[in-house]
Image (tube, grey):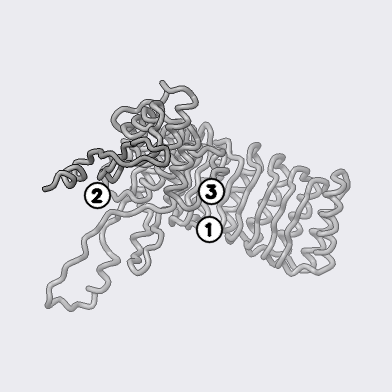
Amino acid sequence: MSRSQSSRRTGSMRPVNAAADGRKMRSIIAEDSEWSLELVPLLTTLCLQHIIKHFREKPILDELTPKYKAYVLQRLPTSLPLTITANLISDESYWKRCCEGRWAVSDVSTYDNSWKRMFFERHLENIIEFFIPDATDTKTVLDVVPLCRNYVKRLKVSQLLPPIRESPRFDEDDRSDCASDTGSEGPSMDHFDFRILLDKLPNLEELNVVYGVKGCGMNFEWNLFEFTFRDCEFLAKALHSCKTLQVFRIHRSKVDDEKCCLLVSQLLDHPSLQELDFSHNHISDRGARAIGKLLNRSQLKRLVVCNNQIRGPGAQALAHALSKNITLLSLNLRLNRIGDEGGQALAQALVKNKTLVNLHLGGNNMTEPTAVALSQALVENCTLKNLNLSNNKLGVDGGKVLEEGMSHNSSLVECDIRLTDVSQDSEYSRQHAKIKHKHDPSAKV
């Protein structure tokens, strides 16, 4: 090998002719692909980059000045373990990057404008929603509790998975007619046990839960949507232990009278519960009586039992409780079957009740007798502001008598009588009265 070739391989220097001034300069021939003419970073920057690179092994943050701390927070990877970041990092810009990198839709306004709260609530929700009983270790939940307990105020659990069940096996010669039906039978399949969690969240105020599976597609089975009695027992005990809970909603979970009574029994005399929502379930009169008992043994301000199977006797039980209640502000009984028996009872309760502001009775098979009773109640009641009677069969005469009662009422702001078969004149008068009342609250409507 020649001497010049050896020099190039080792990256040595050789003299070259200078420019016009005639001086001799030295030029570097380097084979290092990472070599560049850029300036060497400041020592401070190199130190900060080292901190970022080794943050997992040695997290250094609070010891830094505000300027350098901001530099590090802007560049920390969002993949760091929560055991490191949860209680160390409070900077909202870091948690914003964590949320936006994980979820496509991130509306922080619904989380009191706290990105950190959003992250931990949605993170815990995801763990619960994909928890498979008898397969997922409960440590996956319990390990995250110390990290998120101070930030979780609301949980919106939109699905709960059942245990994995092995497919039934049949002999090749088994061609019985019942074989095709076996998939719908079998033991109850319990879901996530909320007892291990709720009492460990000291700031939890709202729980929304659905016992069902999202997007099951062609894998549909009825047991995917089964709210078992053991599920109900576990949930009821968990609710009882959560003394900070203010809002509880359980939707589309086949809550029947027996399960409703069990849940209500654990909510009696609850110190903080203000809203209860049993929408889209199978509650009928027995469950309604239990809820009526709860009304006067709680601090409920809003009760929603829309789209259930409550009939006249159940509505009468609720009306009896309402006549004595001093806390409830809103009652929604939409899409039940209370009829005139229940409608008249609720109208009579309005004469005694002094707190209810909103009442929704839409779609309840009520007719003219209910309109007459409500008309009489409106003469006495001075607190109700919103009354919804839509999709009932009040009729022309019912509309007229209701209009008469409204003319003596000074508090009602809106009365919805769409799809009630009232005359156009009655509907026009109702609209005109509403407009007049908004402009002049002291006027008689």
Q: Nearer the viewer, residue 154 or 314?
A: 154
Q: Helix, strand or loop at disc 3?
A: strand
Q: Nearer the viewer, residue 57 or 251?
A: 57
Residue at (63% x, 41% y) in the render: 328
Label placed on residue 308: 1
Question: Mark 2 is on which residue type?
Answer: Ala
Q: As drawn, is 125 to the left or to the right of 333?
A: left
Amino acid type of disc 1? Answer: Asn
Front-most of 71 and 407?
71
Kind of residue sitting beneath label 3: Asp
Q: Nearer the viewer, residue 410 or 111?
A: 111
In the image: residue 255, left or right of residue 311? left
Tell me residue 98's x, y (percent): 43, 42
The reply, left or right, for residue 369 in relation to residue 308 is: right
Labels 2, 3: front one? 2
Residue neighbourhood size for the residue with mark 2, other residues' Cα within 10 Å, grouped as few (<14), some (14–19), many (≥20): few
> Which residue lies under the disc numbered 2?
135
Q: Earlier in the sequence, mark 2 or mark 3?
A: 2
| Residue 365 shows in the view | yes
User: Decide: marks 1, 2 in contact (CB < 8 A)?
Assistant: no
Vertical order, 220 against 124 (above or below)? below
Residue 150 in view, yes or no: no
Q: Quadrant of residue 170?
A: bottom left
Which of pointers 1 and 2 indicates the residue nearer the eye? 2
Query: How far apart, in angstroms, are the residues tagged by discs 1 and 2?
Result: 34 Å
Report the mark closest to the observer, 1 or 3.
3
Which element type, helix, strand or loop, lies under badge 1? loop
Q: CA distance from mark 1 to mark 3?
A: 11 Å
Name the residue beneath numbered marker 3: 277
